[in-house]
Amino acid sequence: MRVLLFTGKGGVGKTTTAAATALHLAAQGARVVVTSADPAHSLGDSFGAELGSEPTEVAPGCHAQQLDARERLEESWGEIREWMLEVLDWAGVAAIEAEELAVVPGLDELFALTEVQSLCASGRYDVVVVDCAPTAETVRLLSLPDILGWYMDRLFPASRRLTRVVGPLVSRVTSLPVADDKVFSAAQRFYDQLDAVRHVLADPVTTSARLVVNPERMVIAEARRTYTYLSLFGYQVDAVIVNRVLPDHAEGEWVEGWRRSQAEHLTSIEEDFAPLPVFRAEHAGAEVVGTEALGELAATLWGEVDPMGRLVDSRPLKVARGEHGAFVLSVDLPFAERSELDLTRTGDELYVAVGPHRRNLLLPDSLRRREIGAAALAEGRLEVTFVEPVG
């Protein structure tokens, strides 16, 4: 089973690349589904087909869907939403405002992400291709299972126990609606979905993220940041795809200036993102719409390479033995600068922050009883050395 995530700055052609790759894999005999995690769906436009929440066959062996995340939200959040509406009504909040407040912002997008795990578990597909939202939204979305999972692990059990103890007392002295087992069961199902999608997406053997760029300065800069943040949250980035490269046969003085600019950026991409493989797709000169055009794009993009494979064999996070009995926790943080890095340990957890993003790492048993002896950021990797406590 493989999951391929395609993300990039808005307008670089990530949807086209995801759709083309899905068709290419289906033509090779794989059972493929391509799904959109971008609220501004354009997957159907790329295929030139009407798509809905259920996978629709767009070519032999290839299905596609544009999920209505609100539907999945209602299915999984219904009981919790009803309880929140009761609480807000008790607090005197008007019905319309209560309807809005009862849905946590961004939660519908998160349920779109849990659809990936459902597709994997269905057993109907060999590959799930995900057309992600533009990079900033993708990083936020892909960090949510890790962040919300952290809160659920710590707060959910305590909240349930507290409600069982205090709930009956509250009911006697006030009309405040108290969450019952039905609400907590819904929260447990939500947690289980989060946990399942975390396991799928954080497994580099199963999931690979691929950065789609154009040979332009601002796009490349954003891709560098995305690479850093995805690595922080444990996602394996295994390729860079450069779209809209001017073909050699393009002529003209204006085109020649553009070609020189692209050549500089292409060299920068090859050097900066090494050892990631870089794939190029020539500018088609027109919109790439429909299965025939998408198939032609995929053939030139991938050539003899199997896009279903792991194109980089490494792990973003690993623990290894160091010198003198020490252990070294290594985290991939490509392009990260020391000035934007913050590292803190609290009990059994290590907090790693890069710029605006922070990840809480629960330390494995082999590291919990040890102390941090040193930490260094070099060549795109954070290495934290754990040693035996003194005395």
Image (tube, grey):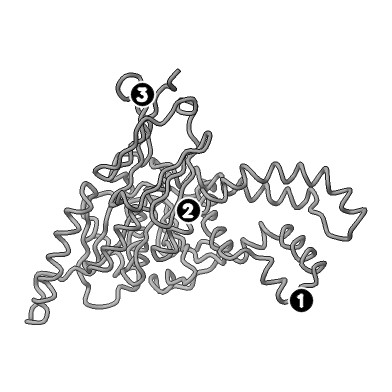
Q: Residue at x 70, y 51 (%)?
A: 186
* Mark in the foreground, 3 or 1: 3
64, 139: nearer the viewer: 139
2 or 3: mark nearer the eye: 3
Real-space Cα distance between discs 2 and 3?
A: 30 Å
Q: CA distance from mark 2 to mark 1?
A: 33 Å
The answer to whether residue 296 is visible is no
Which badge, 2 or 3, is on the more N-terminal residue?
Answer: 2
Residue annotated with mark 2: 143
Badge 3 amino acid: Ala
**How far across and how far down the image is residue 225, in percent?**
33, 58
Q: Are marks 2 and 1 in contact (CB under 8 Å)?
A: no
Using the image as rendered, state which of residue 39 and residue 149 is in the foreground. 149
Task: Measuring from the top left, give residue 84's x and y in whole percent.
Answer: 74, 62
Q: Regarding mark 2 in the picture, which secondary structure is present there?
A: helix
Q: Residue at x 36, y 46 (%)?
A: 236
- Pick the quarter of the image with the N terminus: top left
